[in-house]
Amino acid sequence: MIGQKAYMNWSGGKDSSLALMKVMSDDEFQITHLLTSVNKVHNRISMHGVRRELLEKQAEAIGIPLTTIELPEQPSMEEYEQLMSDKVQKLKALDINHTIFGDIFLEDLRTYRENKLISLEIKAHFPLWKIPTTELMQSFIQQGFKAIVVCVNGNYLDKSFCGREIDQSFINDLPPNVDVCGENGEYHSFVYEGPIFKQPILFSKGEIVHRTYKNPSSSTTSTCSTSNKEKEEYGFYFCDLK
């Protein structure tokens, strides 16, 4: 029996990988598209900074078509929501009425997503919801996923964490105030191997750069913590993958 059509909100990182694998393991949903927000100026995944060509290689290795939301350099919330709405309506026209997110415990972010999608008659599903993040991380490693940290929030972690493999050593080195899955936006990752891929994604590590951004008026397009909302600027380290 083929499940109901759904699209996956795909970041290229570990949480969306775990959520996708969980959904693919049963027959409730048929994932027809991977949906990713891309900075069209730099051709990189929004927030994560991963090159578009590596994103495309992920989709090819998974075997699910990729569709993107093409965002300007620093979109306003109004621009972001309109572009998102336009893309979701195109997916809905293909008889897709469900969507999957990799969120774990951020209540306000889940509420925001659900409220925005209700008006588009899209039902949001959260297969990782309220699973302890330590349990999720151990599952990620034990099931053979491999990932590299591509973005680090400088308010939580220093430069040395950027570009590291996500393994037990990485987990052991995380400060106590950092969620092990980075659910508060402490870090972002790029998954390059695992059970959802037909073959590994080949890449090489480039330089690590630091970028500072003005604080957005809302945190709904990312997973920044409340403390970040109060800052006028915030900085991230990015590891370039080629």
Image (cartoon, rainbow, N blue to C red):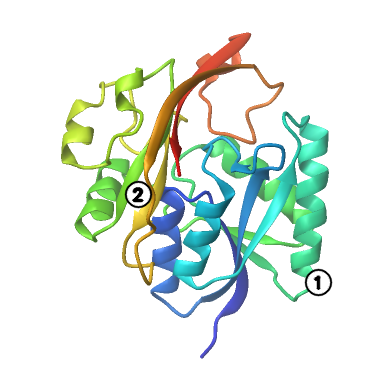
Amino acid type, residue under disc 1 in the picture: Ala
Vertical placement of residue 83 versus 94, above or below: above
Horizontal arrangement in the rendering, residue 81 relative to residue 191 (left or right): right
Residue 180 or residue 188, whichever sits in front: 188
Q: Quadrant of residue 162?
A: top left
**For the residue carrying disc 2, how many other residues have a C-alpha within 10 Å: few (<14), some (14-19), or many (20+)?**
few
Vertical placement of residue 9 versus 106, above or below: below
Residue appearing at x 38%, y 72% in the figure: 198
* Disc 2: which residue: 131
Q: Nearer the viewer, mark 1 or mark 2?
A: 1
Q: Position of residue 77 (x, y in %)?
A: 77, 32
Q: CA distance from mark 1 to mark 2?
A: 33 Å
Q: Which mark is residue 103?
A: none
Residue appearing at x 34%, y 31% in the figure: 179
Amino acid type, residue under disc 2 in the picture: Ile
Q: Position of residue 128 (x, y in %)?
A: 42, 53
Q: Are marks 1 and 2 in contact (CB under 8 Å)?
A: no
Q: Position of residue 155 (x, y in %)?
A: 43, 15
Horizontal arrangement in the rendering, residue 63 relative to residue 117 (left or right): left
- Image quadrant containing the C terminus: top left
Q: Is residue 28 visible?
A: yes
Q: Is residue 129 visible?
A: no
Question: Secondary structure beneath disc 2?
Answer: loop
Vertical placement of residue 47 versus 175, above or below: below
Residue 92 or residue 141, whichever sits in front: 141
**For the residue carrying disc 1, how many other residues have a C-alpha within 10 Å: few (<14), some (14-19), or many (20+)?**
few
Residue appearing at x 51%, y 68% in the figure: 60
Q: Which mark is residue 93?
A: 1
Q: Position of residue 166 (x, y in %)?
A: 27, 41
Vertical placement of residue 14 versus 61, above or below: above
Residue appearing at x 60%, y 78% in the figure: 4
**Number of numbered discs:** 2
